[in-house]
Image (cartoon, helix red, strand yellow):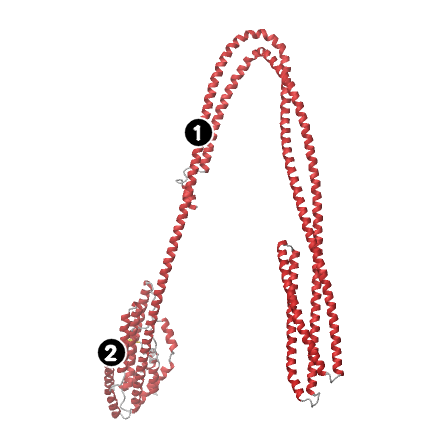
Amino acid sequence: MPLMLDRTLSCSPVALKCRPARLSNLLNKNEVLDLYIDGEQEVTGLNDKHNQKFSIRSTAPYLGQGRPPRPNYTAPSSPKLRKEENLSNIDIDNAWHSHAHEETNDTCKVASMSHGGGQDARHFKVSSEMVSQFGESRAQTTTTVEDIYEELQDVRPPSPFLYSTSADPISSATSGYFAADLSCHEEFNGVHDFSLEQDTDENLLRRAKEVETCFMLPPVENSRLNALRHKRLDSTEMLQLIQGLIEDRKKLASELSSQIKARLTERFATKEEYKRSKLELETRSRRLEKETIDIQSALERELDRRSNEWSVKFQSEEQRLRERVRELAEQNVSFQREITSLESYKVDATSRIKSLELQNKHLDNELQKVKDDRDNLHNSLVEWHGSLAQAIEERDKLREFLNDKEESNKALHKVIARLQRASNEQEKTITGLRQGFSTELEKRAVGNSDITYNMQMELNRLTGVEQNLRREIQSCTLEMVSLRQENVGILNRLQRSEDGVNFSTIRIDQELHARVDSLQMQALSLLDDAGQLCAKLLELIKSNSSKNCSDVDSLAVIEHTLKYQSIKGGIENVKQRLRTIKSLLMEKQNKEEPRQNAGDCLQGQEKLSRDDIEIKLREEAMVSRVLKEKLLSNELDNEQLQSDLAASLRIQDVLQNEIQRVQDELRCLTHKSKHLEVQVLKKDGTINQIEQDYQESAKELTALRCMLKTVSDERDVSWQESKQLRRTVSDLQDEVASLKQRIRALNEDIMLKESEILLREGEISILRDSIDKPFDIICSPRSMKQFGME
């Protein structure tokens, strides 16, 4: 029982971690240690030996746990997290350290209990019971490897102080080795130095060798165990327990070395992976550098292109603005010229005003002279005033009448010119329409005549084809009937004359050979010629349809191609059947030749035997098969001819429909031509009416010219009378002069106002132009914004 307990303790990889919980039952039973006070010196001696042996190997804290160290992540973390992690790790290490101190006391007690063998059997029994209770408690609190790894995922590996204080030398040594390994692993992940990795690998190998050498049982301990065995012959179970511990220690050493070797292999694999990843990273970095160089060059090219485009746009815009400035300068020059011209007009107007003033003064002097005469002429003026008013009224009426007549004459001239132009244009359009319609009607008549002629020719050809097909059908039916009769006659002859079998078969073979040869020589050549002609005709029809481009021609081409394909397939079937018939005849002839030779040798034997009967039956079957095939071929030919006939009938119907449609189109065209003739007649009538109006207006013009002559004579008379009456009108000049002065003042005011208005309008137009299209487009912020947006 103690051996099994110790083996479970040594073999389980999680025993050392769970030791404080499993020894909790022994801590409450301190009274048992009083039984081993006598053997305490021996226990202390054994502990000193163990401390001497395993003092070197107390730096790997958790190697005996049977679990690998927790890997460090290569990704750098934030400083804050590292500080918090360090603080938490310090707290956990302190807790584990305090807990480990308690564990060392407990394990020392157990060691004293296990190594201090009593002097009597009662003490040993009590110790064995305690050990068994200890094993039961450990068995009750066993934990699995999965639980330990789950805990390792959440908790950081404990500090080396927890395991270095353990009383078990194996666990302390293994924990020391794992602590050293963890430190080496962290250095490897943190620095990635190749020389440091080699040092750690050499240290691991050296430590594995040291573990293997240290866990070998030295001869001194073997001699002491032998002496203990001779001294204590009664404590055999204790010796067995010690031997089991030694064996378990060896197993643990071997497991430790295997784990270290596994770790070394893993480290070598990680080195290779690191090298491979480094090479891959270098290749990727080179590829990325090449891609960045390519992208940079492409961007530079794009920038050069865009800069060139923008420079071209800027130059074009600058040229446009310069042209605009030039135009504005030209407008400004033109405006200045207009201003100078207006100033010159103003100077002229002032000079005229001065001359008029001088004239006015002269008239004033004459007016003073005329005032005296006015009194004398006042009486005569009153008399002539009535006659003058009447003459003025008549003159105004005549002027109004003349103005009306002139305006009416001008309007009539314009109307006549417009009507002449319209009549000329209409005559041109009428002549053009007449010529176009005549040519179109002639073309359509010619085209329709050609189409009808072609359709009639096609109908005649189709009727001839239909008659030929019907004749061929009749001849095929007659031939089929004759072949049936010949077949019946041949069968009757064969049944009647049994002696003439050979003769009849020979004759039938000869006839079949002759027929097959004639068909191959004549029919196949004729069929090939017909196929070639059909192909040529199809090509001609396709070329004509491509020129005409009508639906009927396309349908006809499709039907002709289908017919040609069907005829081609029939020709191929006929060729294949002829080949099969010839092959059958050749096989029959080859089979009959040896039989004829055998018949010549056996002339004395029986003429007819079962073989001859079988041959006869085979011949009859072959003949019937050939005839049946011929009948089938004739029936297929009849069906093909019927389908061709139906297709020709459909084509005939289509052609008749097309002819009907063409006739309808001709009727519509004739109706349109008649309608156009009626419109032409109406236009001729309107032209005649316009000519009559023109003649009437010409007559009215001649009459008006005569009236103008009379009016001009009367005007001359009235002019003379007005000269005589001028002197009588001088009394009215005073009133007229005053009115003229007022009118002049008003005209001057109006001219000033107009000049001011013109100046204002010019300024407004300049301001509008400057608002719509600013002059300094390069320096203005709004233009710069627009240029930037473009």
164 vs 19, nearest the viewer:
164
Amino acid type at image mark 1: Gln
Q: Please rate how many residues cluster around mark 1, counting C-alpha atoms within 10 Å: few if below 14, some from 14 to 19, many from 20.
A: few
For marks 1 and 2, give the one nearer the viewer: 1
Residue appearing at x 25%, y 93% in the figure: 230
Residue 217 position within the rendered picture, expressed as x and y whole percent measured from the top left:
26, 85
Residue 770 position within the rendered picture, expressed as x and y whole percent measured from the top left:
44, 36
Residue 709 position within the rendered picture, expressed as x and y whole percent measured from the top left:
64, 19
Measured along the vertical axis of the image, is residue 489 above or below residue 694?
A: below
Q: Secondary structure at mark 1?
A: helix
Residue 299 in view (yes/no)? yes
Measured along the vertical axis of the image, is residue 523 above or below residue 341?
A: below
Q: Which residue in the structure is indicated by mark 1?
A: 336
Residue 168 in view (yes/no)? no
Q: Is residue 235 left or right of residue 488?
A: left
Location of residue 528 by image quarter: bottom right
Residue appearing at x 64%, y 72% in the figure: 576
Residue 595 position within the rendered picture, expressed as x and y whole percent measured from the top left:
66, 85
Mark linked to residue 401:
none
Location of residue 516 by image quarter: bottom right
Measured along the vertical axis of the image, is residue 125 above or below residue 450?
A: below
Q: Quadrant of the N terminus?
A: bottom left
Q: Is residue 733 left or right of residue 135?
A: right
Q: Which residue in the structure is indicated by mark 2?
A: 56
208 vs 632, nearest the viewer:
632
Amino acid type at image mark 2: Ile
Cα–Cα gap, marks 1 and 2 = 116 Å
Measured along the vertical axis of the image, is residue 685 above or below residue 789?
A: above
Q: Secondary structure at mark 2?
A: loop
Q: Is residue 691 left or right of residue 205?
A: right
Q: Please rate how many residues cluster around mark 2, counting C-alpha atoms within 10 Å: few if below 14, some from 14 to 19, many from 20.
A: few
18 vs 481, nearest the viewer:
481
